[in-house]
Image (cartoon, helix red, strand yellow):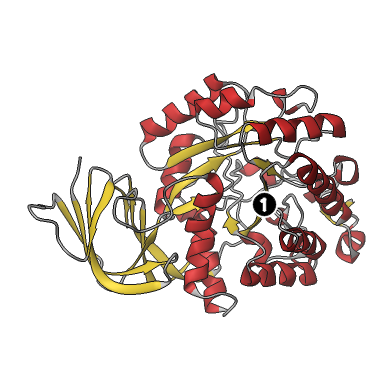
């Protein structure tokens, strides 16, 4: 294994909320020392990190890599390369692949492909129900044994509440986290925008906030009854945030995340029928966006994810309602979150915790921290570097981003994964 020394970097630890200029020593895939060089340590490679911030590698709670099933859009090789260039060392893949992640063989396929690419760790969520059809429970224990870090039905409906209750009970008894994308199918079907004045003016079919809140309410009741450990992903509304806030205050063991784009865009960005802003859940009102920002500041929301969904160009070249939802967003995850720091929404410690320490804890992983004897998954970035996003420069095969032309401050210079240098700018 490669021995690596990172010299003169500013180590920012979101756990202890400390920052110091120091050296980092890495061997056999783990951090073996901080500050003081171990006896007999001889580095095979040295990185001069003067002026750079050393943070835990980012952990992305939701990234669709399009493999297996949609390799014409992207694949594990291309998207893990994009992740490494963005300082992301671990990606969590939802189960809505083709075939669905509802049996160990699919889990093993994805893990093997990711290991072969060698650019980022990929963990998987298993299907809550077989083929995500909402009818029969999956073999959750077998999926967990194969390496799944949780189970989810993605945005596919489980219309029978009795089946959903049984699924939560099974997950609770097996000590498996349930990952929930709150969506009431009958309220959201056919919709493509927030049900509000902008959608009405543009003639777009709206998705009401109740599509999120009704689903959250049902899930919370079942979590209370079954004792399931649950994570709510991709919140989009002020009402949804308030429900999570109250549930946490009552002592429920739940966590939540938000997509980075929901913190910067709202329904007004649809005014020109910009298909790059077609996402699910939809971009909601300015008030909702501000409530989401307040929720990450208050700690109600535990993590920020990319909700990465790369598309081929044709998927976005149609009338708005006919385009496919989703943003290619791995490479804007850190820049957008740092923008929240610059706008004084959250401090840097909180930003990095939302991107690394807390999502790692949600997934039950040891990564997401900078500490001796912990995995050497590291993001090193230049906090002062100003740059403009050009879609031609994206490493992802998806170019579908509404942030083209945006100016950012802070850019990844090195990414270390398992003690190996996976990216250098």
Relative to 370, is 404 on the left or the right?
right
Residue 336 seen by the camera = yes
Image x and y of residue 278, in percent: 73, 52
Graded by Cα atoms within 10 Å as few (under 14), some (14 to 19) or many (20 or more), the crowding at tag 1 reads some
Asked whether, in this view, residue 334 is left or right of residue 36, the answer is right
Q: Which residue is mark 1?
A: 253
- Seen in the picture, residue 365 relative to 246 is either above or below; the reply is above
In the picture, the quarter occupied by the C terminus is bottom left
Image side of residue 186 versus residue 414, left or right: right
> Is the residue 417 above or below the residue 133 in the image?
below
Q: Residue at x 33, y 58 (%)?
A: 371
Q: Residue furthest left?
A: 40
Residue found at the far bottom of this picture: 344
Residue 173: % across, % down: 66, 32
Q: Nearer the viewer, residue 123 or 161?
A: 161
Q: Is residue 101 left or right of residue 247?
A: left
């Amino acid at each position: 294994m490669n021995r690596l020394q990172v010299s003169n970097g500013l180590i920012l630890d979101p756990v202890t909320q400390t920052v110091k200029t120091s050296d980092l020593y890495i061997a056999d895939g783990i951090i073996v020392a901080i500050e003081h060089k171990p006896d007999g340590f001889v580095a095979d490679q040295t990185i001069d990190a003067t002026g750079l911030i050393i943070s835990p590698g980012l952990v992305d709670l939701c990234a669709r890599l399009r493999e297996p099933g949609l390799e014409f859009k992207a694949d594990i090789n291309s998207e893990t390369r994009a992740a490494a260039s963005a300082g992301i060392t671990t990606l969590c893949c939802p189960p809505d692949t083709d075939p669905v992640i509802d049996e160990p063989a699919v889990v093993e396929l994805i893990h093997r492909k990711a290991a072969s690419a060698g650019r980022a760790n990929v963990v998987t969520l298993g299907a809550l129900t077989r083929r995500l059809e909402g009818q029969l429970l999956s073999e959750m224990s077998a999926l967990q044994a194969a390496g799944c870090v949780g189970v989810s039905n993605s945005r596919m409906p489980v219309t029978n509440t009795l089946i959903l209750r049984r699924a939560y009970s099974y997950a609770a008894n097996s000590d498996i986290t349930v990952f929930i994308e709150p969506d009431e199918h009958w309220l959201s079907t056919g919709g493509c925008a927030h049900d509000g004045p902008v959608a009405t003016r543009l003639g777009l079919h709206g998705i009401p906030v109740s599509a999120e809140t009704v689903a959250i309410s049902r899930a919370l009741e079942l979590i209370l009854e079954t004792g399931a450990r649950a994570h709510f992903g991709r919140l989009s509304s002020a009402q949804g945030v308030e429900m999570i806030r109250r549930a946490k205050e009552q002592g429920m063991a739940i966590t939540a995340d938000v997509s980075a784009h929901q913190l910067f865009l709202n329904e007004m960005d649809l005014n020109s029928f910009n298909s790059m802003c077609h996402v699910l859940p939809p971009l909601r009102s300015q008030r909702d966006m501000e409530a989401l920002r307040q929720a990450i500041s208050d700690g109600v929301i535990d993590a920020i994810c990319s909700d990465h969904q790369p598309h081929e160009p044709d998927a976005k070249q149609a009338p708005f309602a006919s385009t496919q939802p989703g943003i290619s967003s791995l490479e804007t995850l850190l820049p957008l979150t740092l923008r929240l720091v610059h706008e004084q929404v959250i401090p840097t410690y909180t930003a990095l915790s939302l991107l690394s320490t807390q999502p790692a804890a949600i997934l039950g992983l040891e990564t997401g921290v900078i500490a001796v004897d912990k995995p050497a998954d590291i993001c090193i970035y230049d906090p002062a570097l100003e740059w403009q996003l050009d879609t031609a420069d994206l490493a992802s095969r998806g170019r579908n981003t509404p942030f083209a032309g945006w100016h950012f401050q802070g850019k990844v210079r090195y990414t270390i994964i398992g003690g190996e240098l996976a990216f250098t700018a």
